[in-house]
C-alpha cells in the first residue's frame, strides 16, 4: 500500500515553525540537540500526519488527495512519544485537536522570538524567577481553581481552563476562553531556581492527571452530560468520589504552588478545600 509521505523539506519546515519543540502543549519538549560527535545532531522529533498518509492509518480521510496528505498543512511536529500517543488513540486525539495544537505551538514559537530573553541581557532587564512566579499566579485566578467540582457550570470550560493553565506554565502565554492573549512571559523552563522549576514540573504533571481523569470519567459515563432545550448543558456526577478527587487534587496543586509563592514573597492562591465551608 502506497504512502503519501512528507518530503524532507516539508519535515524541516514543520520542525522549524514550532522551534524544534513538540507541538503538544502539554509536552513542549525540545526535539533536537547535540550528539557526542561535534559534527552531528540528535533528533527525537517526528513530522506526523494529522490525517494518515495511507488507508487504515489514524484519522485517514479518503476525501483528501495524495498531494493534500503530503502537504505541510496536514503535518504536525511532535516528539516520538506524543506521535505514538496520538496515533494509538485517534478517538482521543481528533483532527481538530491536532490542528489546534499546531496553531498554539506556532504562536508560542513566534512569541519566543518576539520577546526574547537571552542570557547576555543585563540583570535589570532580565525576567526574574519572582516575576515568573507572579505571572503563573494569574493562571490560577479562575473558577476552575476556585469552585467545588460538583458546582462547575460547564465541564467543557473546566477542562479547557486546565489545558490553558498547562499551556501558560509551559509556554508563558496566558489566554482567555476565546483564545485572546491575556498576558505573556516565559515558560517554566526559564526558572533559574531548580527547586521552583521542579515544583512547577510537578504541578504540570498533576494538572495533566486531572485532565486524564476527566477524560476517563466522560468516556466511562462517570460524568453524565445532557443538553437542555434552551441550549445549556446539564451535568450529573453520580459518583461522589470523582468530585472529591478533583477537589483534593486541585487543592494539592494550589498547596504546592502556594509554597513557591511563599518563598517568592508573593500572595499565592488559597487551596480550594480551605474555601469550602466546614460543618
Image (cartoon, rainbow, N blue to C red):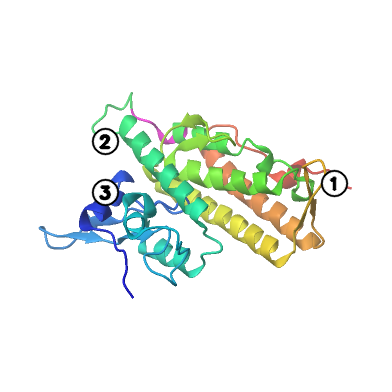
- Mark 2 element type: loop
N-terminal of the pair, mark 2 or mark 1, is 2
Residue 278, numbered label = 1
What residue does disc 2 label? 119
Query: Does 193 sit left or right of 176 as displayed?
Result: left
Looking at the image, is mark 1 or mark 3 nearer the viewer? 3
Residue at x 74%, y 64% (from the top left corner) = 221
- Mark 1 element type: loop
Cα gap from disc 1 to disc 3, whole angstroms: 56 Å
What residue does disc 3 label? 13
Q: Position of residue 165 (x, y in %)?
A: 55, 43
Residue 59 covered by magenta stretch: no
Q: Are marks 2 and 1 in contact (CB under 8 Å)?
A: no
Cα gap from disc 2 to disc 1, whole angstroms: 49 Å
Q: Are marks 3 and 2 in contact (CB under 8 Å)?
A: no
Cα gap from disc 3 to disc 2, whole angstroms: 27 Å
Q: Position of residue 216 (x, y in %)?
A: 65, 64
Extreme residue toward the top, this view: 124
Q: Position of residue 14 (x, y in %)?
A: 30, 50
N-terminal of the pair, mark 3 or mark 2, is 3
Label 3 crowd (10 A; few <14 / some 14-19 / many >=20): some
In the rendered image of this protein, does residue 123 appear above or below residue 235? above
Quadrant that contains the N terminus: bottom left
Amino acid at each position: 500500500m502506497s504512502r503519501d509521505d512528507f518530503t524532507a523539506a516539508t519535515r524541516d519546515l514543520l520542525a522549524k515553525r514550532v522551534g524544534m519543540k513538540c507541538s503538544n502543549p502539554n509536552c513542549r519538549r525540545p526535539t533536537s540537540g547535540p550528539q557526542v560527535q561535534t559534527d552531528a545532531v540528535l533528533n527525537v522529533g517526528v513530522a506526523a500526519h494529522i490525517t494518515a498518509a495511507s488507508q487504515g492509518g489514524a484519522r485517514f480521510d479518503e476525501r483528501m488527495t495524495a498531494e493534500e496528505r503530503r502537504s505541510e498543512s496536514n503535518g504536525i511536529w511532535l516528539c516520538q512519544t506524543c506521535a505514538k500517543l496520538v496515533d494509538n488513540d485517534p478517538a482521543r486525539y481528533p483532527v481538530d485537536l491536532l490542528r489546534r495544537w499546531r496553531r498554539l505551538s506556532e504562536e508560542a514559537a513566534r512569541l519566543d522570538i518576539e520577546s526574547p530573553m537571552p542570557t547576555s541581557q543585563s540583570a535589570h532587564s532580565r525576567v526574574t524567577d519572582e516575576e515568573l512566579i507572579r505571572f503563573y499566579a494569574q493562571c490560577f485566578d479562575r473558577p476552575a481553581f476556585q469552585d467545588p467540582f460538583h458546582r462547575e457550570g460547564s465541564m467543557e470550560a473546566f477542562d479547557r481552563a486546565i489545558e490553558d493553565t498547562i499551556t501558560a506554565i509551559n509556554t508563558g502565554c496566558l489566554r482567555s476562553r476565546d483564545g485572546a492573549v491575556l498576558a505573556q512571559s516565559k515558560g517554566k523552563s526559564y526558572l533559574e531556581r531548580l527547586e521552583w522549576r521542579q515544583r512547577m514540573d510537578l504541578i504540570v504533571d498533576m494538572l495533566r492527571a486531572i485532565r486524564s481523569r476527566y477524560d476517563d470519567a466522560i468516556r466511562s459515563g462517570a460524568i453524565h452530560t445532557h443538553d437542555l432545550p434552551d441550549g445549556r448543558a446539564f451535568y450529573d456526577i453520580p459518583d461522589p468520589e470523582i468530585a472529591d478527587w478533583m477537589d483534593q487534587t486541585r487543592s494539592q496543586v494550589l498547596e504546592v504552588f502556594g509554597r513557591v509563592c511563599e518563598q517568592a514573597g508573593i500572595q499565592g492562591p488559597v487551596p480550594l478545600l480551605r474555601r469550602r465551608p466546614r460543618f
